[in-house]
């Protein structure tokens, strides 16, 4: 299969939006089911200034990727897991739930219509953004009566240009990302706006991102603003347990399974106290955008803690390489994570 590619400088591709041919759009009324949608030219959409999403933040989204694989196929990575999370998130925000088949088929339609924007093998991936909003107008606080589901795509290169970047992070003591019994475990748009101000202040001081603590005792690590966090110490790979305030990341779950089933590591989903982080041999974050990105140092109050002498640790490196190998279908593995798109 020889796929025609768009005229893009693939070697210079970063993690920025590139306009593609089309996007998918569907609408649904409250109390009905998602059943029909269509491809439309990529472009702006029209909303009332009183739209519920603009006034009260009723919206959720997903992030996933398609890859041009080693065996010359275009494949989606763990799309069913994204579908499951979208189903949960829509329920949590009183949005008509999007069932798995509708979600997956809509993603496939969008990718197929933009196949020439999937980067060549080894040059990047196609980032896929499904998002659903409450679009009907309302003056008072209530769930919308009408909803719009959109999927747009963009070719992307590495999140950090110039190779592996070791992150310099700040542990946030003045702000929280989410709280137990809130919506931290849903991929709600409001969760990300809550982290914008702490991130701005951190970047002004030279940090790359922020690590958030639990909102009760403030002695446990939860997650980074847009990624999950892992530590490795004394033969054990650990990540904060899902407590209702932490997003159940697809890459997080993938790294846990790769660690245990391929690398033979002991993996624990558990409380990670500040002391555990400070004493770790390695620390790294995971996400659809950042994949597996090592943490070089973290600052807490007036102290700075460094990991693995400023180098990417051997465990993070193995996990990073194995994840990429699986996404590109370069190695045999015990998982059924790739869904080839039939062209």
Image: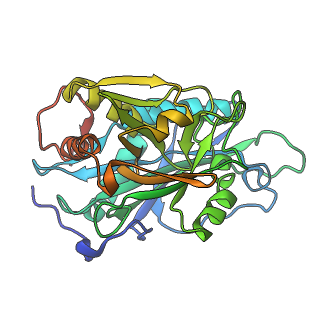
Q: What residue is at 46 percent from the left and 37 percent from the top?
A: 249
Q: What residue is at 41 percent from the left and 32 percent from the top?
A: 81
**In this rendering, is residue 343 above or below 30?**
below
Tell me if 80 is positioned left or right of 330 in this view. Answer: right
Could one spot residue 27 in this view of the protein?
A: no
Q: Residue furthest right?
A: 140
Q: Nearer the viewer, residue 100 or 198?
A: 198
Instruction: Where is residue 232? Give x, y as percent.
Output: 36, 35
Tell me if 21 is positioned left or right of 327 in this view. Answer: right
Image quadrant of residue 280?
top left
Q: Nearer the viewer, residue 74 or 14?
A: 14
Q: Nearer the viewer, residue 205 or 151?
A: 205
Instruction: Where is residue 39? Give x, y as percent.
Output: 44, 56
Instruction: Where is residue 10? Give x, y as percent.
Output: 25, 71
**Which colour assignment does the render follow?**
rainbow
Tell me if 213 is positioned left or right of 109 in this view. Answer: right
Could one spot residue 42 in this view of the protein?
A: yes
Q: What residue is at 27 percent from the left and 60 percent from the top?
A: 124
């Amino acid at each position: 299969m020889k796929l025609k590619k768009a005229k893009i400088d693939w070697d210079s591709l970063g993690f920025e939006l590139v306009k593609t041919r089309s996007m998918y759009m569907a609408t649904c009324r409250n109390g009905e089911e998602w059943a029909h949608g269509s491809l439309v030219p990529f472009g702006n959409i029209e909303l009332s200034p009183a739209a519920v999403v603009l006034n009260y933040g009723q919206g959720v989204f997903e992030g996933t990727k398609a890859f041009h694989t080693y065996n010359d196929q275009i494949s989606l990575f763990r799309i069913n897991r994204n579908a499951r999370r979208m189903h949960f998130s829509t329920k949590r925000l009183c949005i008509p739930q999007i069932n798995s088949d509708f979600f997956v088929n809509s993603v496939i339609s969008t990718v197929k219509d933009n196949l020439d924007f999937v980067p060549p093998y080894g040059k990047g991936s196609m980032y896929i953004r499904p998002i659903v909003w409450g679009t009907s107008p309302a003056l008072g606080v209530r769930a919308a009566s009408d909803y719009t589901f959109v999927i747009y795509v963009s070719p992307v290169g590495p999140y950090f240009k110039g190779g592996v970047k070791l992150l310099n992070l700040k542990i946030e003591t003045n702000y929280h990302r989410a709280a137990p019994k809130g919506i931290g475990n849903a991929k709600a748009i409001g969760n990300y706006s809550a982290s914008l101000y702490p991130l701005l202040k951190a970047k002004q001081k030279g940090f790359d991102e922020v690590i958030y603590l639990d909102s009760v005792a403030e002695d446990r690590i939860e997650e980074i603003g847009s990624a999950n966090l892992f530590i490795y110490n004394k033969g054990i790979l650990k990540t904060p347990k899902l407590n209702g305030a932490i997003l159940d990341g697809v890459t997080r779950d993938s790294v846990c399974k790769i660690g245990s089933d391929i690398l033979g590591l002991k993996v624990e989903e558990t409380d990670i106290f500040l002391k555990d982080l400070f004493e770790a041999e390695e620390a790294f974050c995971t996400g659809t955008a950042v994949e597996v990105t090592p943490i070089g140092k973290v600052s807490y109050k007036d102290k700075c803690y460094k990991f693995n002498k400023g180098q990417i640790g051997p465990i993070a490196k193995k996990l990073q390489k194995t994840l990429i190998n699986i996404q590109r279908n370069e190695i045999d593995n015990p998982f059924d994570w790739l869904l080839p798109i039939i062209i």
